[in-house]
Amino acid sequence: MSFSYDKLLERAKSKLKVDVKRSGALRLELPEPDVIWVGNKTIFRNYAEFPKLLRRDANRLLMYLAKELATAASIEGDRAIFIGRKDKEAFLQLIQRYMKDAVICPVCGSPDTHLEREKRLWFIVCEACGARSVAKVV
Ligand SMILES: [Zn+2]
């Protein structure tokens, strides 16, 4: 039996992918959003933990949440303030969606990624498998 170099390389790569997939199975565990309502505002008290954990810009994530919730928001220290009463389930769902679209590597499932801008596109660059995937949101 003889394999061409290309075939061997392909085999080595596919083996690598499997190994990476296994290590990528280690998912991020999100903390529970600590949310209170004050008047007509929602105070997201542990907001800062989320962008830190996802290694994303706190303002970008805030803009994403505000847009999806169709409201205005601002950051005050570790907290984020949203206009209107929003519940923690809504935040959790949106943060999970953000992770899927802008954090998790679609190739291997690893959350160890960063964003890189190339011309008009943002890419999720995976530090586990090296894949570059277009981010749906940033
Ligand atoms: Zn990856």
Image (tube, helix red, strand yellow):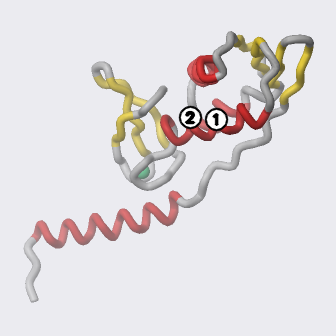
Residue 106 bears which disc, if any? none
Q: Is residue 82 left or right of residue 3?
A: right
Name the spot of residue 4 as percent of width and height, x first.
8, 73
Task: Name the residue at 64% across, 35% down.
Answer: 95
Task: Name the residue at 83% across, 13% down.
Answer: 41
Q: Is residue 3 above or below residue 34?
A: below
Name the spot of residue 121 as percent of width and height, x first.
33, 25
Task: Name the residue at 91% across, 12% down.
Answer: 39
Residue 29 appears in view: yes
Name the spot of residue 43 as percent of width and height, x first.
83, 20
**Quarter location, residue 21:** bottom left
Q: Which quarter of the rendered picture does the N terminus lie within?
A: bottom left
Crowd rating for badge 2 (residues with CA inside 10 Å; few <14, some 14–19, many 20+) = many
Q: Is residue 7 left or right of residue 114?
A: left
Q: Which element carries disc 1, helix, strand or loop? A: helix
Q: Is residue 55 above or below residue 128?
A: above
**Residue beneath label 1, please?**
95
| Kind of residue indicated by mark 2 | Tyr
**Residue beneath label 2, please?**
98
Residues under numbered marks 1 and 2 in contact, where contact means CB atoms less than 8 Å apart:
yes
Q: Residue furthest bottom?
A: 1
Residue 76 appears in view: no
Q: Is residue 53 left or right of residue 82?
A: left
Mark 1 to mark 2 CA distance (whole Å):
5 Å
Q: Is residue 61 above or below residue 135?
A: above
| Kind of residue indicated by mark 1 | Ile
Q: Which element carries disc 2, helix, strand or loop? A: helix
Name the spot of residue 66 as percent of width and height, x first.
64, 18
**Quarter location, residue 99:** top right
